[in-house]
Amino acid sequence: MRETFPGTMDLSDPTTLVLSVILCFFVALFFYGRKRSSKYNLPPGPRPLPIIGNLHILDLKKPHQTLHQEMSVIILCALFSPLVISTGIMFAYDDNWKMMRRFTLSALRDFGMGKETIENKITEECDFLVEKFRSYNGEPFDNFILINAAVANIIVSILLSHRFTYEDPTLVKLLKIVNENLRLIGSPMAVLYNAFPSIMRWCSRIQKKVAKNINEMYVFIQETFTSRRKELDVNDQRNLIDAFLVKQQKESPQLYFTNENLTTLVSDLFAAGMETTSTTLRWSLLLMIKYPEIQRKVQSEIEKVIGAAEPQVIHRKQMPYTDAVIHEIQRFGNIVPTNLPHATTQDVNFRGYLLPKGIHVIALLTSVLYDKDHFVKPDEFYPEHFLDSSGNFVRKEAFLPFSAGKRSCVGESLAKMELFLFFTRLMQNFTFQAPPGATVDLTPALGFTAGPLPHKICALPRV
Ligand code: HEM
């Protein structure tokens, strides 16, 4: 047996050898990481550890809160390789994204966005929702599926010229798939999966479950939405799917207007158009329950400006208080806190720092919506953020719940119209309260979008 001295290593011992190699690997990665960030002159941030990057400081339940640090870069980890989908619009890139975005914007405009046609559709849907709320006679109920379904019907009318009843099994199934996936994608397990796909693949079922849901959604969309090609009349295009199919017939060779793009695009628009707006509306009712004096002020402005008539978009200009409340709901609700992930398409000089081409960037919406330089009480629900001292509505440049730039939300004007019409109509017809004995919890639920935790409300009829 060979003698080893205290404080020295015996490299002939296999365990010591393996441990030494691993240690050298970590040290090399550590210095490589530091060299890489100094080469690129990235903005400052906490020092990343080898392999795991800054994962150890990340709150997996609320990643945006860890990331909300001014001018800092959080290195998620060296192995980051997120799921990339090249079809549709939301996760597409390059020419396919450009074509789908251009088509979507023009189809949304042609089939009603920003026009009276869609305003009438929303007003009609408000009738159904009010009737449903009224049927509970002031007793507690969960508004989740009802609001989901009402909002889903607006995007479905643009996609398919169709309306589902709130109990329709097709709609209920679609809503279940979308909601489950958004919850899974925002879960701590999914954050870990994105950071360590090769390791997590072995110990987490999350990716399989999400993929299964997406697949089910696509099959379902093909059966229910896109199978309508048999009824297509080129001279009478009634909806976005018709417009896509007409483009498909004209395109040769088929590059962009493919069946895959149609399925993913419809799925993207359904999910984005339904989930975000309905989550904001659910926040709106919960916040009105929490702050009854604000609810009363909104109701008295409605009485003054609209009376018993149906709310219309033209009323908004005369309703600065309600407008400020809706803006504050969106700011405070902060429902897409981490925004969608992006990547630089070229080297970018950002405030004297270099973000190299291809780097993944998460432009946190929390950082603007909760910016104390723009909002005096960022952590409070305070509609005065959007009012001047005379009670006039004021715009804020940091109000960016729809993000900014080339990839900003395509449904912004549709969403704004929906929020105003649904919110005023519900406030006109009901006073909202918590069920007897219940307290209002404003903690956001875990998920890709930050909605309220499950809760019940009471809708007391006013008229
Ligand atoms: C309150 C409601 C809504 C909010 C807060 C919201 C917010 C957002 C945000 C933050 C993004 C990411 C922007 C970025 O990547 O920088 C986005 C993208 C998108 N939104 Fe919305 N959205 C809302 C409603 C809608 C509606 C009603 C539609 C349906 C027409 C829609 C369709 C989309 C699409 C297709 C994208 C991807 C755009 C692209 O990648 O080019 N959204 N939205």
Image (cartoon, rainbow, N blue to C red):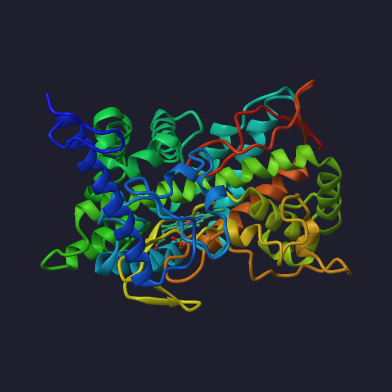
Q: Position of residue 370 (x, y in %)?
A: 66, 57
Residue 337: percent from the left, percent from the top?
A: 54, 51
Rendered position, 449 above or below 302: above
Q: Nearer the viewer, residue 405 or 148?
A: 405
Residue 79 in sight: yes
Where residue 116 sits in the image (x, y, percent)? 57, 63
**Location of residue 98 with respect to 323 vertically, above or below:** below
Number of residue marks: 0
Q: Is residue 319 visible in this depiction of the protein?
A: no
Give the answer, above or below, for where 369 lies relative to 150.
Answer: below
Q: Give the farthest residue toward the right.
A: 390
Residue 318 is situated, as x and y percent measured from the top left of the image, at 79, 66
Residue 281 sits in which quadrant? top right
* Residue lying at 32% horizontally and 58% vertically, measured from the top left: 31
Q: Nearer the viewer, residue 48 or 105?
A: 48
For the C terminus, which image quadrant? top right
Tell which of 457 and 117 is nearer to you: 457
Picture residue at 75% right of the left edge, 63% below the top: 386
323 on left or right of 258: right
Q: Quadrant of the N terminus?
A: top left
Q: Quadrant of residue 71?
A: bottom right
Q: Nearer the viewer, residue 410 or 364?
A: 364
In the picture, measured across the screen, residue 173 lies left or right of residue 61, that is left
